[in-house]
Image: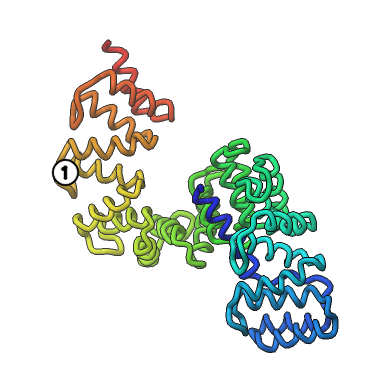
Amino acid sequence: MNPLRRILLAVVLLLPSLFPSPAVAESAKVRQGVKQVAARQYKNALKSFRDAIRKDPNDAEAMTRIGDLYASGQGVPRSDAEAVKWYAKAAPLGHAAARFALASRYASGRGVGKDPAEAAKWCRLAADQGHPGAQSLLGFLHEQGMGVPRDEAESLAWYRKAAEGGDVAAQKLLAWRHIEGNGVPKDPAAAAMWYRKAAESGDPDAQARLAGMYRDGIGVPKEPIEAAKWYRKAAEKGNAEAFAGYGRALLYGRGVAQNESAAADWIRKAADRGVPEGFFLRGVLYSYGRGEPKDDVEALGNYRRAAEEGYVDGQLQIAGMHLTGRGAPPSDNTAAAWYLRAAEAGNPDAQAMIGWLHEVGRGVPKDRKEAARWFGLAAAQGNTVARDRLKHLEAIR
């Protein structure tokens, strides 16, 4: 299963245990219990919800709230089985949140035997009632063919309904699909729109992705101030990718006042969490003695960690260091190997460099035909140096 799909399923299935049920026509006792939950008086809240059921045995909202307490272990021992019992009482009474919660348990097998058909049944009922989480889960079920026929068009329709209803997981999925052109037109502007909706709901992952789009001018104008703003929001919520993005903004003063000390703090946090951009930026700190002591060995080590994770800037940096012998042992072969990795990943600067290495025969065989091929690839992406070298090769044929 695609990693993003796993994340989506995990988010959708966890939602009922992470968030309380939305308010419907609540009794006085339920309203009292909701206030007690907000005040973290969970045992008192449980008593209020039970009092509501004693007064009205069909109080589905109170039943669902008790299920939520058991699902999250608030005021009672955490128990998916007990949560399912209460959701199963409320779901036949028409409570949308209970139906979604029950569907998610049948889909995941938490607290009840895994049963895709039952999951789809309860999910469809809740989705038809306009529950965004259920609509998102139903989109996933149709995408995977779990309990319902596999149907990409139906899946996309439900994801869109969920996203329009405010479901963050569906909004992020649609954004990713528009970036990749997966089942929808490739449309960076649409991707940015969906990421913005999720970001404005406070989702740190969406905030970091929106920041990156503003930084690189993908789907939105290149806007350093907006990029720094969203990176800061995401970083302050603990998003590791944003640690690096905000650290970079602070390091170079892009969209925010330059602050090398604060930049180094954020960059260290990113590197400590294994973020490739964090490794690269920490290499920069060591290379130039900015926020870290100048140390070529530490710099090269951090660049290498970034490069080995596929971070192209790290690959280019190592290649250049080995090619020039600055901060690394001179080695045309090592330089060519790293330029080739970056070139094969589609980087036009690396493609131009590997073309030049083939043209002059450094680290790779001298081969004008191969040089022209790489220059052509780089030129097609707008690399002017490659375009000039290509014209030169054509002129001396």
Count the numbered circles shown. 1
Q: Compared to 260, does 380 lie above or below?
A: above
Residue 158: x and y, percent?
70, 48
Residue 281 can be seen, yes or no: yes
Q: How is the image coloured?
A: rainbow
Residue 84: x and y, percent?
67, 70
Q: Nearer the viewer, residue 62 or 262?
A: 62
Residue 79: x and y, percent?
60, 76
| Residue for badge 1 | 325
Q: Residue at x 58, y 43 (%)?
A: 177
Q: Secondary structure at mark 1?
A: loop
Q: Is residue 287 left or right of residue 344?
A: left
Q: Residue at x 76, y 72 (%)?
A: 89
Residue 266: x and y, percent?
40, 64
Q: Quadrant of the C terminus?
A: top left
| Circle 1 Cα neighbour tier, 10 Å, few/some/many (<14 / 14–19 / ≥20) | some
Residue 136 can be seen, yes or no: no
Q: Nearer the viewer, residue 69 or 349?
A: 69
Q: Quadrant of residue 16?
A: bottom right
Q: Amino acid at mark 1?
A: Gly
Q: Quadrant of residue 65?
A: bottom right
Q: Is residue 275 left or right of residue 207?
A: left
In this view, the residue farthest toward the front is: 113
Q: Compared to 374, does 285 lie above or below?
A: below
Q: Is residue 334 left or right of residue 371?
A: left
Q: Quadrant of residue 61?
A: bottom right
Q: Residue at x 34, y 49 (%)?
A: 309
Q: Compared to 328, does 61 lie above or below?
A: below
